[in-house]
Amino acid sequence: MRILKYILAYLFWTLLSLFIGIGYMRLVLGANTVSEEGLGYLLHLFYDIGMIQVGLWVGSAIALCFVLLDIFYLRKKLKNNPKRTVIRLAVLLMITVLVSIVHYLLEKVIDVI
C-alpha cells in the first residue's frame, strides 16, 4: 500500500511537471496568430503540435530532475515537516527555472537546439 501511495504521488508530480513544461513552451512561443482557414490550418496545427511535443520534453526533463532529487534527498529531509508539499512545489518551480535557463542557453546563446 505504501508503494502505491509513492507511485501515485510521483505520478501527480510528473503530470504537474509536464503541464509546467507545456506552459513554459506557451510562454516562449507566444500566442498562435496563424489563421485556422485554408493553408493556414496546417501551420496552426504544426504550431500546436510543436508546442505540445517540445513542452512534453521540457516537462519530462523537469520531472526526471524532480523525482530523482525527491527520492534521494527531499524525502529524507522532509520526513516530519508539515509544509513538505509547499517545499516540494517550491523545489519543482526552482528546477523549472533551471531547466528554462539551460534551454535558453542551448537555444539562443550556444545555438545547439
Image: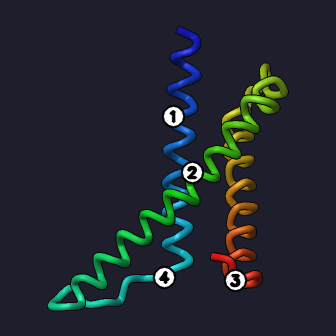
Q: Secondary structure at mark 1?
A: helix
Secondary structure beneath label 4: loop
Q: Residues within 10 Å of mark 2 (few under 14, many from 20)?
A: some
Which marked residue is nearer to the observer: mark 3 or mark 1?
3
Give me the C-alpha separation between circle 4 and circle 3: 20 Å
**Element class at badge 2:** helix
Q: CA distance from mark 3 to mark 1?
A: 33 Å
- From mark 2 to mark 1, how far is it between C-alphas? 12 Å
Does residue 102 appear to the left or right of 3 in the view shown?
Answer: right
Q: Residue furthest front?
A: 112
Q: CA distance from mark 4 to mark 2?
A: 21 Å
| Crowding at mark 1 (Cα within 10 Å: few <14, some 14-19, many 20+) | some
Q: Amino acid at mark 1?
A: Leu
Q: Residue at x 70, y 40 (%)?
A: 88
Q: Is tag 4's residue or tag 2's residue first in the polypeptide sequence? A: 4
Residue denoted by label 2: 60
Location of residue 76 by image quarter? top right
Figure check: 52 above or below 1: below
The first of marks 1 and 4 along the sequence is 1
Q: Quadrant of the C terminus?
A: bottom right
Few, some or many residues within 10 Å of mark 3 (<14, 14–19, 20+): few
At a point 75% along the width and 76% down the height, the residue shown is: 105
User: Residue 98, relative to residue 60: is it above or below?
Assistant: below
Of helix, strand and loop, which one carries label 3?
Answer: loop
For the residue marked with disc 2, what is the amino acid?
Ser
Q: Which residue is mark 1?
A: 11
> Upstream in the sequence, badge 4 or badge 3?
4
Q: Could you say where residue 22 lies in the image, as x and y percent from the top left?
A: 49, 62
Which residue is labeled 4 in the image?
30
Say which mark, if any, is on residue 111. Answer: 3
